[in-house]
Image: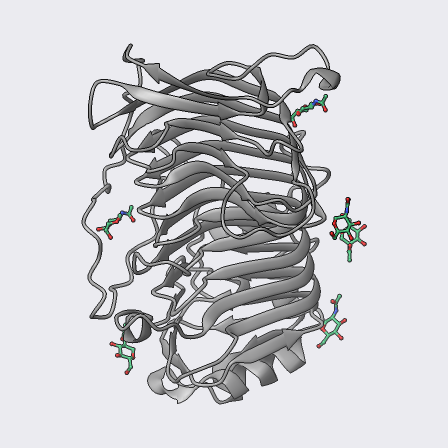
Amino acid sequence: MQGTLLTLLGLLPVFINAQLSGSVGPLVDFATKARNKTCDVTDYGAVADGETDIADALLSAWGDCAVGGLVYIPPGNYSMKTAIELKHGQSSAIQLDGIISRGADLAYQMILVRDADDFEFFSGNSKGAMQGYGYEYLQSGEYGVRFFRFQDVTNFSVHGFAAIDSPSYYFVFDTCSNGEIYNILVRGIVIGATDAFDIWGENIWVHDIEVTNGDECVTVKSPSTNMLIENIYCNLSGGTAIGSLGTSTDISNIHYRNLYMNTADACYLKTNNGNGTVSNIIWEDVIVHGGPYPLTLNEAWGSDSGSIGVQLKNLTFKNWHGENAANSRPTIRLECDADVPCYDITIENVNLWTDDGDYVYWSCQNAYGSGACLAEADSTADLATYNTVVTITATPSYSTRTMASDLTANPPSDSPFTIPPMPTSFFPGATPVSKLLHLSAAGGL
Ligand SMILES: *[C@@H]1O[C@H](CO)[C@@H](O)[C@H](O)[C@H]1NC(C)=O
Ligand SMILES: *[C@@H]1O[C@H](CO)[C@@H](O)[C@H](O)[C@H]1NC(C)=O
Ligand SMILES: *[C@@H]1O[C@H](CO)[C@@H](O)[C@H](O)[C@H]1NC(C)=O
Ligand SMILES: *[C@@H]1O[C@H](CO)[C@@H](O)[C@H](O)[C@H]1NC(C)=O
Ligand SMILES: *[C@@H]1O[C@H](CO)[C@@H](O)[C@H](O)[C@H]1NC(C)=O
Ligand SMILES: *[C@@H]1O[C@H](CO)[C@@H](O)[C@H](O)[C@H]1NC(C)=O
């Protein structure tokens, strides 16, 4: 009963913020799909013995349920020894209530979902998980398979499970639209090239996400438009960046809000030349504790991608509080390319201090707008190049709330991770937008 009620609630059209361009999520709820046809992987040869390869069973179940049905992976410990591709889903769902562990050396990604419409990948009992045993590679500086790639998936949601210790990236959403991604826990080793969410596409709502890793937390890539990203807890991770950006960049209408950064960076927008535009972006209500580059536009990052530079315009940074750990870098860095000065930048109520000393500094180059060290200009004809560094000695009112589970010690990288329970909050004081599911059967039926 409860499951049905939640399902119905989940089906209400979601059009939550002007930043989104329409409703997001699957068109038909999972209970309806399950009622039409349920394909339980254990009826197709899957065995929860932590040994038998689940791949063939999952593919066969998908074959029968990809159109109009629900593939059910019941509680239990499954091993995956073959990477799989789930193609051409049409109004279907996959309910992951068990744990899928990587059981072999695999290539590309464990699960590729592509060309699907009206699709849902979720845990019904909020105990589903992927376990990558990434430490087996990462402890010696090597990388293995990624977890998920969703490619050309529309009208979808992905929610309610944990993605633990990937041998490489966790989630890539490549050219997806009308999506909702929420209530997901990512935890892995603090090392580079372990991006948690790399997303590009349009009309996507990402909310209530917790990430502990060593690279990008929730990152928007080009081309992208109309995204709302909120209640994001980045723990020891690279943070919420945009980019890196190259030629033909096209990113607009992105709203980040309620970002909690424990030793992570809230905005790192990085390019080196390239072309195209990034415009109409808001970063609002941000808490940063110890991020090395808390607020950074850097158009001289990495290698030169050719062309004249990406135009950045209409970027707003509002209601920020926090501090960096080492004071060797600016707390506010707005460094734009001399060939394409940035404009309409707004820095409003941004309070960033340091744990390391009695001053901070801000750096502005070729950046126009209001606040911090930005130069002002009446029109785009007046955007001359300049470079300034300002030292700030007055302590702002920067201190703010913390999360109970903040710890700073890196997790061990030489043993398997325990799969933690799903968190119940992803931003200090905030309740997740959608409750975790507690279904006891396929589709909650
Ligand atoms: C799952 O199976 C693997 C491989 O046998 C084992 O290492 C792991 O401890 C099992 N996990 C659980 C939660 O049973
Ligand atoms: C129900 O499932 C069958 C496959 O078993 C599929 O052919 C049919 O289109 C589905 N119906 C709906 C309404 O999705
Ligand atoms: C996605 O949903 C919208 C309605 O919200 C519909 O118009 C569209 O055809 C659906 N499928 C694709 C592939 O966009
Ligand atoms: C960006 O640069 C590429 C290659 O240098 C060029 O083909 C493309 O036309 C440029 N696009 C824009 C929007 O200037
Ligand atoms: C600037 O961006 C905001 C937020 O995306 C948007 O509401 C506003 O219309 C944009 N302004 C201009 C001049 O495009
Ligand atoms: C943050 O990272 C530390 C170190 O891995 C870990 O012990 C702690 O549980 C993490 N907190 C959350 C909420 O993930």
Residue 36: x and y in percent read: 67, 69
Residue 294 falls left or right of residue 122: left
Residue 135 falls left or right of residue 198: left
Front residue (pair 284, 63): 284
How does the figure colour the protein chain or chains? one colour
Q: Residue at x 32, y 45 (%)?
A: 235
Residue 152: x and y in percent read: 70, 62
Quarter of the figure with residue 384: top right
Quarter of the figure with residue 9: top right
Q: Is 10 located above or below residue 393 in the figure?
A: below
Q: Is 433 located above or below residue 58 in the figure?
A: above
Residue 328: x and y in percent read: 29, 33
Front residue (pair 237, 249): 249
| Residue 289 visible somewhere in the drawing | yes
Front residue (pair 53, 166): 166
| Residue 70 visible somewhere in the drawing | no
Residue 34: x and y in percent read: 61, 67
Quarter of the figure with residue 345: top right
Q: How many marks?
A: 0
Q: Quadrant of ligand 5?
A: top right
Front residue (pair 18, 138): 138
Q: Residue at x 23, y 65 (%)?
A: 413
Q: Is 427 located above or below residue 112 in the figure?
A: above
